[in-house]
Image (tube, helix red, strand yellow):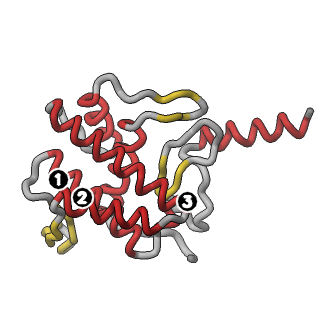
Amino acid sequence: MTGQVSFDSHARNVLAASVEYVNRLTPGYSGGTVFPAPADEAQAVVDSLAAIGYPRPSVRPEDARRLSALAGRMRIVFEAAHSGDLDRAADEVNALLVDTNARPQLDRRNDGWSLHFHGPDDGLVNGWAAGCAAGLALALGTGLAGRLGVCAAPHCDRVFVDVSRNGQRRFCSPQCQSRVKAAAHRARQS
C-alpha cells in the first residue's frame, strides 16, 4: 500500500474512540507495567471521550459497564487482525454490528453529506458502540485490517490504528518505541 491512509473524519473518530476504549477500559499491560481494569469505569469512559475531543460531563454506571464490555470485544478484533486471523476479527465485528444494530445514515455537514453509523438511538452507548463497530468493519472490509495493531513492546498490549505512510508502525506510543530502542542499545553495549 502506498501513500498515507486517509479515513474520513467520522471513520477516523470512531476508530480513535475504539482505540481509546480498548486502551483505557481493558486490563493488561501498558508501557511495561500492569494496567488494571479501571476502578471507576464511568470516569474512564469520560476520559476516553475527552481524549478524542468529546468531553462529556457524566456517564451513567450502566453505560460505562456496557462500553467496558464492548472494549473487551473490540480488543479481540485488534488482536485477531494484528495476528492475521481476519476470519476471527470479521466474526467478532459482524457480531458487534448485529448487537449494536449499527445502521448507515447520511448526515449533512457544512461541506456536504457524510456517511455515519448510528445505533437504534443516539444515546452514548448505542451511538458510540454502533459507530465503533462500523469503523472496525470499514477497516477490515477495505483491506486496512493490517493497520489495526497491538504494541510490540515487551509488557505492553495497548492497541493502535496505523495511519502512517509506510504502514510499519509497531508501537502504541513513542514512549514504548523509545523503551525498546533503549533496551536494544543497552544490550548492544554489554
Residue drawn 54% across the image and 46% down it: 172
Q: Nearer the viewer, mark 3 or mark 2?
A: 3
Residue most extreme to the top: 39
Left or right of residue 87: residue 173 = right
Residue type, mark 2 in image: Gly
Circle 1 is placed at which residue position?
Answer: 127
Callout 3: SS: helix
Dot 3 amino acid type: Ser
The mark that comes first in sequence, 1 or 3, is: 3
Q: Which mark is residue 30?
A: none
Which amino acid type is shown beneath numbered disc 1? Gly
Q: Quadrant of residue 120?
A: bottom left
Q: CA distance from mark 2 to mark 1?
A: 6 Å
Q: Please name the residue shown 39% across and 44% down the image.
A: 22
The residue tagged 3 is: 83
Q: Nearer the viewer, residue 10 or 74?
A: 74
Quarter of the image for residue 185 reads: top right
In the rendered image, the vertical position of residue 18 relative to residue 23, given as above or below: below
Between 99 and 34, the residue placed more toward the observer is 99
Dot 2 falls on a residue whose secondary structure is helix
Which is closer to the viewer, label 1 or label 3? 3
Task: Tell whether label 1 touches label 2 (CB within 8 Å).
Answer: yes
Residues at circles 3 and 2 in contact by the CB criterion of under 8 Å: no
- Quadrant containing the C terminus in the rendered view: top right
Mark 1 Cα shell of 10 Å, populated few (<14), some (14-19), many (≥20): some
